[in-house]
Amino acid sequence: MPTATDFKDYYNLLGVSKTATSDEIKRAYRKLARKYHPDVNPGNPEAEEKFKDINEANEVLSNPEKREKYDSFGQYWKQAEVSGTPPRGTSTYADNFDQYSNFDDFINDLLGGLGDRTRTRQTYYRTSTRQPDDGPFRSQAPAPDTEAAIALSFSEAFHGVQKRLQLDDETINVRIPAGAKPGSRIRIKGKGRSSPFSQQRGDLYLTIEVLPHPFFQFSGDNLTCEVPIRPDEAVLGAQIQVPTPEGSVTL
């Protein structure tokens, strides 16, 4: 597991900004490579180590795909690199997981595969309908509302997602807004089942359920996670890279 002191700031090693172009990175690398090349510094282990570091920095920052992972995941970028393409899910339900799969697969790899045991790509919903009571005035009873529970992945709940639900013979497209929390309800007007008496339709109420995530947990309006650090970092303090659903941040 990488720690804060293992992290190499490739931009700092090459002396360029995080917005540097590929040409600027190439020029900075060539300049430093000439300065620290072992042939120019024979018998100098510090220069040799510096030369290795700038080569490593150039290898990552000159590769657009690796640079994107490095910018997104910070000190954990190598785990993201190893995770590669996520495995295909086995669910037959429609999902919109592709835009978040890199981050989830990265977390899963970071935790040594724990995510496979706690995550499922299957999105489901269950329904129950409140029917009006029988009685002499039942023809005037309001249309029944339909209650449903829909399960979302953590990424879907955090970022929002478009879902397609099958209610009886009708397909309903539902937009789940970003930041949906467990237990929150969404009302979809006129999408409940029809009244057998008036043929009017009630409303559909969706209750959000969020599938467990191996790294993040909801705590009221906040998200919590645990980041590993070494004892000396806890005592002396350190800058660490912390993954978030929107990319890595430095604390």
Image: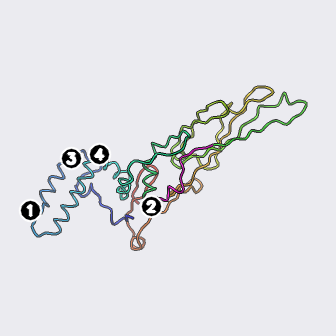
Q: Which residue is mark 2?
A: 112
Q: Nearer the viewer, mark 2 or mark 3?
A: 2
For marks 1 and 4 on the same chain, the one whose residue lies earlier in the sequence: 1
Magenta-drawn stretch, dominant element (helix, strand or loop):
loop
* Residue 121 painted magenta: yes
Amino acid type shown at disc 1: Asp
Location of residue 119 in the rendering, given as x and y in whole percent from the top left corner? 53, 53
Q: Which residue is mark 1?
A: 39
Q: Report x, y in % for residue 112.
A: 44, 61
Give the CA separation, mark 2 to mark 3: 37 Å
177 sits to left or right of 100: right
The amino acid on which the numbered mark 2 sits, given as a three-letter code, is Gly
Circle 1 SS class: loop
Instruction: Tell me which segment is drawn in magenta.
Output: 111-124
Residue with the most extreme right position: 136
- Mark 1 → mark 2, Cα distance in angstroms: 42 Å
